[in-house]
Image (cartoon, rainbow, N blue to C red):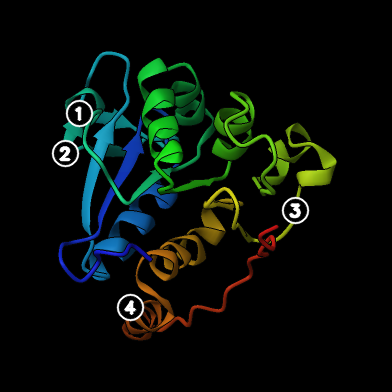
Amino acid sequence: MTNDAQQRPIKVAVCIAPGTEEMEAINTIDILIRAGFEVTTASAASDGALIVEGSRGIKLVADVALVSIADDPFDCVVLPGGLGGAECFRDSPLLVEFVNQHKYDGKLVAAICASPAVVLEHHQMYPKAIMTAHPAFMEQIPEDRRRTKRVVFDVNGNLLTSQGPGTSQEFALEIVVRLAGKEKAAEVAKPMVVWPNMHYEVLPRV
């Protein structure tokens, strides 16, 4: 949880790109807004487009181009999956630097589906972190750091990962837990008729 969470809104950047998996982006954005967070949807499209076509052909609309907020601090950066979107993230030096800067600042980074493997592992951003990913990309994560849980939190790296569209609600609720606590997550989950039954694995701090 951020130390100054009571003094200002919790700010989260959710990145999108052509090929982003729609459920993972929309479920996360929706749940974080329900939690009262200030959510900025940022397009990492190479042409700066704010309207991008997701992995299933649904149009996603960003608030801003990533370049316009690249120097702004956030409490969390979220990378939805979808292979096309993850590859766009991987190939964007701006996106990689944006994530790395928040990592260096000790902020929460949350990635789901293809993004843990295709983006984070590809660039060796978290070379010691445990993580999960969509089963189709699990082999890209070294066996000693690979977990098959639906949601995995690495304490040392402050890194949250998850497996895919079907785990996106748990993923988003765990972001709420990490930024605002379990009571807030339960408050958000109750009217949604879900309970934050978390399936994450915590790596003890050493």
- Relative to 3, does residue 135 appear above or below in the rendering? above
Residue underneath mark 4: 188
Q: What is the C-alpha distance between the residues marked 2 and 3?
A: 34 Å
Asked if the residues shown at circle 1 and circle 3 are in contact, with their CB atoms under 8 angstroms apart, the answer is no
Numbered label attached to residue 63: 2
The earlier-in-sequence mark between 1 and 3 is 1
Query: How far from the left and from the top, in percent, is residue 42?
Result: 25, 35
The earlier-in-sequence mark between 3 and 4 is 3
Residue underneath mark 1: 50
The residue under the point 25% across, 28% down is 70
| Residue 116 picture quarter | top right
Which is in the foreground here, disc 4 or disc 1?
4
Numbered label attached to residue 147: 3
The kind of residue on which mark 1 rests is Leu
Horizontal side of residue 110 vs 179, given as left or right: right
The kind of residue on which mark 3 rests is Arg
Q: Which residue lies furthest to the right in this view?
A: 143
Q: Is mark 2 on a helix, strand or loop?
A: loop
Horizontal side of residue 34 vs 124, given as left or right: left
Q: Nearer the viewer, residue 113 or 13?
A: 13
The residue under the point 75% across, 53% down is 147
The residue under the point 76% across, 47% down is 146
Q: Quadrant of the N terminus?
A: bottom left
Query: How many labels, in total?
Result: 4
- Relative to 187, does residue 36 appear above or below in the rendering? above
The earlier-in-sequence mark between 2 and 4 is 2
